[in-house]
Image (spheres, grey):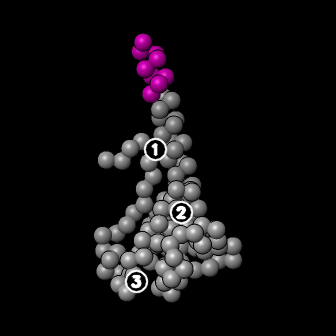
Amino acid sequence: MAKPGWRWIKVDVALPRHPRYDSMTWAAKATLIEMWLHCQEDMTDGHVRPAVWNRTGTAAARQQLLDYGWACPNGDGYLMSNYLEHQQSRQDIENNSDRKRKAGQLGGIARWRRA
């Protein structure tokens, strides 16, 4: 069960059978998921800064992400392909956080009025 405040990524159970994933090494597969986790944790909407790109995985694993189309250079870093089609955007996360905060405030006010 997820704990309050935890964020998550979606990973389709069919991912290991995806044609772009079949021939990748385990290192490249782990690097792909680590990049997705970074994007969600830092709410980058799929963008990976060069410094993060260069320290995640190995050079060979990162090259496979490029070769297999899971990432592409975008001028000021790298963009994870189709990230926002499957993951929450920064705006979605912020909206959900605001909604939960407001609901919590209303609940607190209701409890205070009953006391």
Q: Amino acid at mark 2?
A: Cys
Residue found at x 31% / y 47%:
1
Seen in the picture, residue 63 relative to 87 is either above or below; the reply is: below
| Disc on the earlier residue, 3 or 2 | 3
Q: Position of residue 55 (x, y in %)?
A: 57, 69
Closer to us: mark 3 or mark 1? 3
How far apart in space, not on screen, are marks 2 and 1 (Cα)? 16 Å
Q: Which residue is mark 2?
A: 39
Q: Is residue 95 left or right of residue 111?
A: right
Residue 109 included in the magenta stretch of the image: yes
Residue where numbered disc 3 is placed: 24
Magenta span of residues: 107-115
Q: Is residue 27 visible?
A: yes
Q: Which residue is mark 1?
A: 5
**Main SS of residues in magenta:** helix
Label 3: element kind: loop
Kindly tell me whether residue 85 is visible in this rendering: no
